[in-house]
Image (cartoon, rainbow, N blue to C red):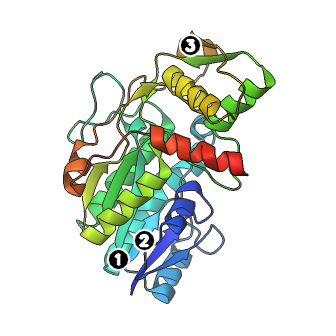
Amino acid sequence: MQRILVTGGDGLLAYQLKQIAPTGVEFCFTGHAAFDLANPVLMAQRLDEWHPQVVINTAAYNLVDRCEIERDLSWSINATAPQTLAELCAERNIRLVHYSTDYVFDGAKKAPYTEADPAHPLNHYAAGKFAGEQAVLRASPAHLVLRTSWVFDWHPTQTKTFIHTILKSAREGRPMKSATDQASVPTFASDLAQWTLDLVQGGGTGLFHAVNDEGVSRYDWAQGILAAAAEAQLIPAVPAVEPVLSAYFNSTMRRPDYTIMSNEKLSRWLGRPLGSWRPGLKKMLAQMERF
């Protein structure tokens, strides 16, 4: 039986991996206390105790603005820890799956980014994630890196996502503004989990862009959420959203304005289209309606 160790065991992606866990695979979902990414000795000990064939690293420091402030902490989690884990796995002939981000690009291309396009991080979060993914790829040709973006899905305890915020504002009648000059691809975590397992079981290695179809602006993403929520009767009607530029929000951090990634390579590898995020959004909202 194949054994897969999943870090970040309480997170969104780990939760979805639990939901689709196939027979013939033994999963070990572990949190920070049992598998501290900042503790190489503990990680080595756990790998030697559990003997996984595959490690799926879903843990990351994703508070993008905080990364500019807590630079040492974010770098240790997003760059140093993946490198250490990748090297420990390579020494033990364990395959590592690691996740990176669309933010490694600067947005200048204005056309969907492929895996062959050069990265140019604009902020500390992106720089750390790029350093981490490259270290993973260097450590072993058997390792796998999946770049993704705007990951969403239902989770029993995560209720402060962009989708939750939009719905709360709609229900409370608060005015909403959303940026028209930031574009990426919403990605349904259940889909991402399935692609991950397909790649693991099919022997996928190297770098893939793992996103759904249909890139949108942040403004269009908000409109899509509200339309689907009204259809699901989670809100009484679709409220107005004021289109604004990103500068309105006065962020001190540089953000790329266009990070839509092409999923053509992964689609070819899997032998099927990856599909729109819209069915996933409906599934998430149906879950929210039941809880």
- Disc 3 to disc 2, C-alpha distance: 40 Å
> Do the residues under discs 2 and 1 have CB atoms within 8 angstroms?
yes
Along the line of sight, the residue nearer the viewer: 264 or 33: 264
Q: Which mark is residue 166?
A: none
Q: Which residue is mark 1?
A: 94
Q: Quadrant of residue 64?
A: top right
Q: Nearer the viewer, residue 114 or 69?
A: 114
Q: Tell me if residue 28 can be seen.
A: yes
Q: Of the residues shown, which amino acid type is indicated by label 2?
A: Val
Residue reaching furthest to the right: 172
User: Which of the two labelled residues, at mark 3 and mark 2, occupies the earlier sequence position?
Assistant: 2
Whether tag 3 and tag 2 are in contact, CB under 8 A, the answer is: no
Position of residue 83 relative to residue 126, above or below, is below
Q: Earlier in the sequence, mark 2 or mark 1?
A: 2
Depicted 22 relative to depicted 241: above or below = below
Question: Residue 107 location in percent, x, y?
Answer: 35, 25
Please give the label number shown on residue 247: 3
213 sits to left or right of 72: left
In the drawing, does residue 58 fall left or right of residue 184? right
Q: Amino acid at mark 1?
A: Ile
Disc 2: which residue = 55
